[in-house]
Amino acid sequence: MDKGSTQRYIGAVNGVVLCVDRSDANVGLLEGRFWHGFSEEPVPVWHTHQMVREMERFFDEIRFPFPSNNMRSFTDATAAQGRSQEKVRVMADEVMLQKRGDLGTFIIRVQHRQNSSWQGRITWVEEDRTVNFRSIWEMIKLVESALDTVDPEDAEEEAAW
């Protein structure tokens, strides 16, 4: 951690480090991987929607942050028991913070899952800047704007770092 850096920390069990290698907002391309403390292997990412689905799956697996509304399920109770196993951290935050993407690296801390979306904080590691976000859409726009892939027409609507 840099001495002047106050934003480069994970800070929560559900914190992830998103490493972006390629990006094209026009087609939803967000290629790279994200790391979390419960696996020594990264979760590959090749599309924005796939990234959101995989992160949502991760949050569901560790049961944090707990969603304010759940999907209905018509499966039996034994299927649900497989998801409730306790997870064990296998990667230290310091190791995760060493991971980098070719285009950009972001520390994402989802604090709440309310109104079928996420609310939290995102840190752009290369610039050591942290911004709060109120929805998944806003978080994606922050990543896109940091990677400079947002269309000029959307610049007025994008969230600023």
Image: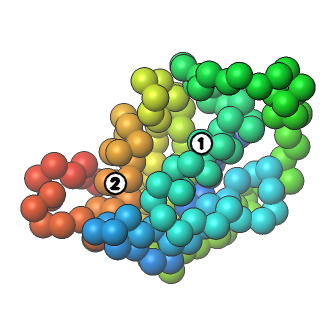
**Is 138 located above or below residue 50 in the figure?**
above
User: Which residue is at 85% across, 40% downward?
Assistant: 87
In this orientation, does residue 146 appear? no
The chosen color scheme is: rainbow
> Alpha-carbon neighbours of circle 2 within 10 Å: few (<14), some, or many (≥20)?
many
In the rendered view, does 137 fall on the left or right side of 105? left
Under mark 2, the amino acid is: Leu
Under mark 1, the amino acid is: Glu
In the rendered view, does 112 fall on the left or right side of 76? left
Q: Toward the viewer: 139 or 6?
A: 139
**Residue 161 x/y as whole percent:** 29, 54
Kindly identify which numbered label has been placed on residue 142. 2
Please name the residue that numbered disc 1 is placed on. Answer: 56
Which of the two discs, 2 and 1, sits closer to the camera?
1
Q: Toward the viewer: 34 or 92?
A: 34
**Residue 94 x/y as whole percent:** 72, 59
N-terminal label among 2 and 1: 1
User: Which residue is at 45% across, 77% downward?
Assistant: 22
Mark 2 residue element: helix
**Residue 36 x/y as whole percent:** 70, 53
User: Which residue is at 68% across, 24% downward?
Assistant: 73
Mark 1 residue element: helix
**Residue 86 x/y as whole percent:** 88, 34
Task: Using the rendered view, name the quadrant where residue 138 is placed.
Answer: top left
Task: Using the rendered view, name the quadrant where residue 57 is placed.
Answer: top right
User: Which residue is at 45% across, 59% downward?
Assistant: 48
Task: Using the rendered view, name the quadrant where residue 68 is placed.
Answer: top right
